[in-house]
């Protein structure tokens, strides 16, 4: 879906742009979020489908407290297609760290678009928010995401053993982190 509204704020990478969400993104967000592969990699709980009303409510609450969390839409630079989202949450200002997350629609995966988007998010958090550390958790069966995070400089910090039950078996959850000093060296 090509977005109808052009937000004024954006951050451009090599392949993608981070921008504010638009109302026109909602149907595509719903499709991506309800895709079984995307849902399998995002949520530790029971994978129940979201309704249009759920996404509309989510959209209406976006940006209410940017001091704690914010979600960016990701679009391709060339075609301006909405392809997914990323953002930060659970900011600890005293200890200077935040948790991040990202999802990409399945048809846009394996093209380094998610890596480009994560690099932009990392740059924004370290440059504009002056935080010291960014953390995330990823399921051990999501090897593609782990490789992408490692390309961005994230390091494995720990393993929560058999934390996730998927497809009839238990899987580990991997904790990863990136320090500002490490990012400055690879930037």
Image (spheres, rainbow, N blue to C red):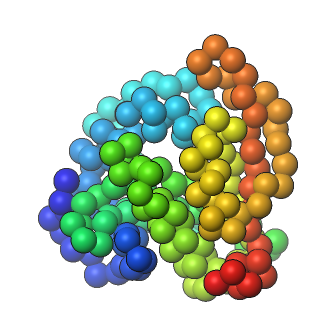
Image quadrant assignment for residue 36:
top left
- In the image, taking residue 51 as reference, residue 140 lies left or right, namely right
Q: Can the viewer see residue 154?
A: yes
The front one of 153 and 100 is: 153
Q: Where 30 falls versus 157 (above or below)?
A: above
- Quadrant where the C terminus is found in the figure: bottom right
The image shows residue 2 at horizontal and vertical percentages of 18, 60
- In the image, taking residue 123 as reference, residue 136 lies left or right, namely right
Q: Where 24 falls versus 186 (above or below)?
A: above
The image shows residue 118 at horizontal and vertical percentages of 54, 65
Q: Going 72% across and 22% down the picture, which residue do you hit?
A: 170
What is the tally of numbered marks visible in this picture?
0
Image quadrant assignment for residue 92:
bottom right
Q: Going 63% across and 59% down the picture, which residue do you hit?
A: 149
Q: Going 69% across and 81% down the picture, which residue do you hit?
A: 186
The image shows residue 29 at horizontal and vertical percentages of 33, 47
The image shows residue 121 at horizontal and vertical percentages of 54, 71
Q: Where 117 falls versus 44 (above or below)?
A: below
- In the image, taking residue 48 as reference, residue 56 lies left or right, namely left
- In the image, taking residue 143 as reference, residue 117 lies left or right, namely left
Q: Where 152 falls versus 107 (above or below)?
A: below
Q: Going 38% across and 43% down the picture, which residue do you hit?
A: 106
């Amino acid at each position: 879906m090509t977005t109808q509204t052009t937000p004024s704020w954006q951050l451009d990478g090599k392949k993608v742009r981070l921008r504010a969400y638009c109302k026109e993104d909602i149907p595509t967000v719903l499709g991506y979020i309800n895709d079984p592969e995307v849902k399998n990699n995002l949520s530790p709980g029971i994978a129940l489908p979201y309704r249009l009303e759920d996404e509309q409510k989510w959209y209406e609450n976006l940006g209410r407290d940017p001091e704690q969390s914010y979600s960016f839409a990701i679009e391709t630079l060339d075609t301006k297609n909405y392809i997914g989202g990323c953002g930060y949450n659970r900011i600890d200002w005293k200890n200077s760290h935040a948790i991040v997350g990202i999802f990409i629609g399945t048809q846009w995966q394996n093209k380094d678009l998610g890596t480009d988007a994560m690099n932009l998010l990392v740059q924004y958090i370290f440059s504009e928010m002056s935080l010291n550390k960014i953390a995330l958790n990823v399921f051990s069966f999501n090897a593609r995401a782990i490789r992408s995070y490692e390309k961005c400089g994230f390091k494995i910090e720990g393993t929560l053993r058999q934390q996730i039950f998927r497809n009839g078996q238990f899987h580990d959850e991997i904790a990863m982190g990136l320090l500002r000093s490490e990012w400055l060296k690879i930037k």
